Image (cartoon, rainbow, N blue to C red):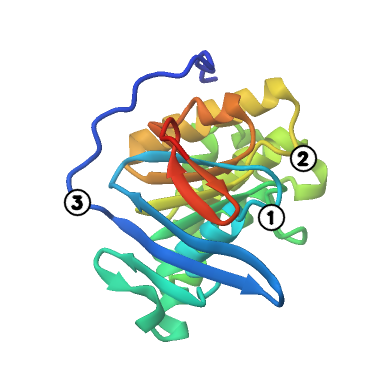
């Protein structure tokens, strides 16, 4: 099992040249509630960025806009230079299946499917036949130390085991970007450290960029850099307000 690094903040690594995913001046409201008010963010290939903020600051809304799950009211989100809002719904869905991977706070595994079937699901949705899809899924379960749970259903897994399976599912399509929304929020500190160590190591190995939403500074310490969301606006950690 991977050993969790210390939570001491480390210097940011050099950012890759050329942004992979860019949000520019994003505004988003839900009724009378303004969630984002001019938020901007760039994510470079292979980079791990932590998005920090208190509850209700707009950080999860920003992630959902960047992932194409919701449309901003104003501003642009582009992936590899393509404006996501200009894509039809089918194209955005295909992008999320092939290029994006997702890890949420409670895993969101399909309860009726086995752990193996859950991990293989994105490949099956992309048209891969069952046997090769499950072979790839099993390889990822092995890499995340939960191969023995392949036939278990989500209800039979602990929180940490479920999150490992969710990470395997996120990585099985070799995505360019992983969106992780409070991936350790439902775990105790020990299992949270273990899950973050595995997520970070697996993403580094695969070359995926990671956009990580968290309120936990220990989790944010795994990132190359931090972006703070406050009152719907963004700033680099360490910048003056």
Picture coordinates of residue 184 (x, y %)? 66, 36
In what element is the residue under mark 2? loop
At 33% from the left edge and 67% from the top edge, which residue is drawn? 78
* Image side of residue 207 versus residue 35, left or right: left
Q: Which one is in front, 22 or 161?
A: 22
Nearer the observer, disc 3 or disc 1? 3
The disc, 3 or 2, on the residue closer to the chain's N-terminal end is 3
The correct choice, above or below, for 154 with respect to 49 in the image is: below
Question: Furthest residue to the bottom?
Answer: 88
Q: Which one is in front, 38 or 197?
A: 38
Q: Is residue 69 visible from the viewing direction of this image?
A: no
In what element is the residue under mark 3? loop
Using the image, tell me which numbered label, if any, was put on residue 157.
2
Q: Is residue 199 visible from the viewing direction of this image?
A: yes
* Image side of residue 83 versus residue 92, left or right: left
Residue receiving disc 3: 18
* Cβ atoms at labels 2 and 1 below 8 Å apart: yes
* Image side of residue 76 versus residue 157, left or right: left
Using the image, tell me which numbered label, if any, was put on residue 71.
none
Q: Which one is in front, 203 or 63?
A: 63
The correct choice, above or below, for 192 with respect to 183 in the image is: above
Q: Measure the alpha-carbon separation of dots 3 and 1.
A: 34 Å
* Image side of residue 84 versus residue 44, left or right: right
Residue receiving disc 1: 109
Nearer the observer, disc 3 or disc 2? 3
| Mark 2 residue crowding within 10 angstroms, few (<14) / some (14–19) / many (20+) | some
| Mark 1 residue crowding within 10 angstroms, few (<14) / some (14–19) / many (20+) | many
Picture coordinates of residue 76 (x, y %)? 38, 71
Q: Measure the alpha-carbon separation of dots 2 and 1.
A: 11 Å
């Amino acid at each position: 099992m991977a050993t969790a690094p210390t939570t001491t903040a480390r210097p940011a690594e050099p950012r890759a040249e050329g942004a992979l995913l860019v949000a520019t001046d994003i505004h988003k409201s839900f009724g009378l509630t303004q969630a984002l008010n001019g938020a901007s963010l760039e994510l470079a290939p292979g980079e791990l960025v932590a998005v920090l903020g208190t509850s209700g600051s707009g950080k999860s809304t920003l992630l959902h806009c960047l992932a194409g799950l919701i449309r901003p009211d104003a501003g642009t989100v582009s992936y590899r230079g393509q404006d996501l809002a200009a894509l039809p719904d089918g194209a955005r869905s295909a992008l999320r299946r092939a290029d994006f991977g997702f890890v949420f706070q409670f895993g969101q595994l399909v309860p009726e499917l086995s752990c193996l079937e859950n991990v293989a699901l994105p490949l099956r949705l992309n048209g891969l036949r069952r046997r090769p899809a499950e072979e790839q899924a099993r390889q990822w379960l092995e890499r995340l130390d939960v191969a023995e749970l392949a036939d278990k259903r989500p209800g039979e897994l602990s929180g940490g085991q479920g999150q490992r399976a969710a990470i395997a599912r996120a990585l099985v399509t070799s995505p360019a970007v992983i969106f992780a929304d409070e991936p350790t929020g439902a775990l105790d500190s020990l299992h949270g450290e273990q899950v973050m160590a595995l997520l970070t190591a697996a993403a580094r190995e695969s070359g995926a960029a990671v956009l990580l939403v968290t309120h936990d500074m220990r989790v944010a310490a795994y990132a190359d850099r931090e972006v703070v969301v406050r009152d719907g606006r963004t700033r680099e950690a360490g910048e003056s307000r």
